[in-house]
Image (cartoon, rainbow, N blue to C red):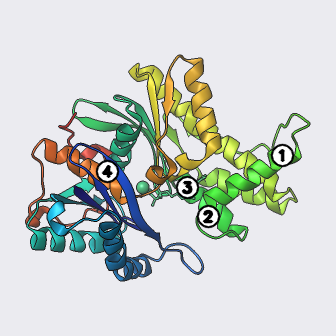
Amino acid sequence: MILGIESTAHTLSFGLVSEEGEALPSSSDLYTPEEGGIHPREAADHHSEIAGYLLRNLMNENSLQPSDISAIAFSQGPGLGPCLRVGASIARGLSHSWDVPLVGVNHCVAHIEIGRNQTNCNDPVLLYVSGGNTQIIARRGGRYRVLGETLDIGIGNMLDKFARTHGMAFPGGPKIEVLANDWLAMNSHCTMDGISLPYAVQGMDLSFSGVMTAANQKISDGHRLEEVCWSLQEHSFAACIEVAERAMAHTGKEQLLLGGGVACNARINEMARVMCEERGATSYCPPKAFCVDNGTMIAELGRRMLSVSESTVLEDSAVSPGLRTDQTIVRWD
Ligand code: ATP
Ligand code: FE2
């Protein structure tokens, strides 16, 4: 078994993948701020406090001994420095005391590899939609290339901030999805035009702060929260799907893979499915537990890196908060 440790932001998670690539459920806990956005040091304190419990839980549930673990993978970046450092310290400690290799992995690439592991798609365009990241990615020439991305905030961060402004605690994305569905149910008898919001596609890039400001304004103008939630999803998801479609057209790839926490949303999955069907392509999405941040995805990327003899020596194991998707050289299948 390869043990994976995820600690880039809100989530601390330990997960396991067998050497053959069987992915087991992670043992995770989410830090939720009492008010406001994430405070990196408080999140890091949360991670240190809960780590021992989560790891013991995972080992006991799977009846594992330390001798069953053949390597330790951890998120080296991108993410919040204090949070990353907790995961990296645990990983270094375990690797040293259990005498097994250490593998520092790129968190964004891990979202891709768990998706490939779970869906068996082999060469997709990836639509990576999470709190901190919104990227359209495709593999070419030994890298996962970023073909388009948000120029300001991540789509999930936009949803969380909008939700917080209107009294909904983190994570806001799932709550917005419920309200949008309520609006659909209230209007099931008629055709909906929705509210007009900015639609921020700029070439292959996206932006979300303008649409959030406009959505807040619509609430001040007296529109119902459910209606604004529905329109916010329609506008922001359609923008992502448009860029993903253009990426598929340019690269000639016939698979779309969704990943990141926002990929839990049924509406963005539906849009992806329709777009792919219309162009004779196929849309894939891993189960929700593997869309959100999880230790299993870190273990899976560690497994693939070890398959091409890549591991991380102690001197190279410092965290890398600004690591980009396309900085990692991809040598594995
Ligand atoms: P990354 O470091 O990759 O940016 P992250 O820290 O944002 O990851 P994830 O677990 O990948 O963590 O994603 C969390 C985000 O997913 C939050 O913004 C949350 O609101 C959003 N999300 C979760 N479920 C849904 C949903 N059903 N609809 C929309 N957004 C969702
Ligand atoms: Fe993530």
Foreground residue, 131 or 87?
A: 87
Q: Which residue is mark 1?
A: 185
Q: Which residue is mark 3?
A: 156
Give the residue drawn at x 47%, y 53%. 289
- Measured as percent of width and height from the top left, residue 150 is found at 49, 47
Circle 2 sits on which residue?
161
Tag 4: residue type?
Arg
34 and 80: which is toward the camera: 34
Provide the secondary structure element on which disc 1 rests: helix
Disc 4 to disc 3, how far (Cα)? 18 Å
Q: Secondary structure at mark 2?
A: helix
Q: Is residue 190 left or right of residue 259?
A: right
**Beta carbon of the mark 3 residue lies under 8 A of ligand 1:** yes
Q: Position of residue 51 (x, y in %)?
A: 34, 76
Front tag of 1 and 4: 1
Tag 1: residue type? Ala
Task: Give the Cα separation between the discs numbered 1 and 3.
Answer: 24 Å
Q: Counting residues from the N terminus, which is met first, the one under dot 1 or under dot 3?
A: 3
Q: Residues within 10 Å of mark 2 (few under 14, many from 20)?
A: many
Q: Are marks 2 and 1 in contact (CB under 8 Å)?
A: no
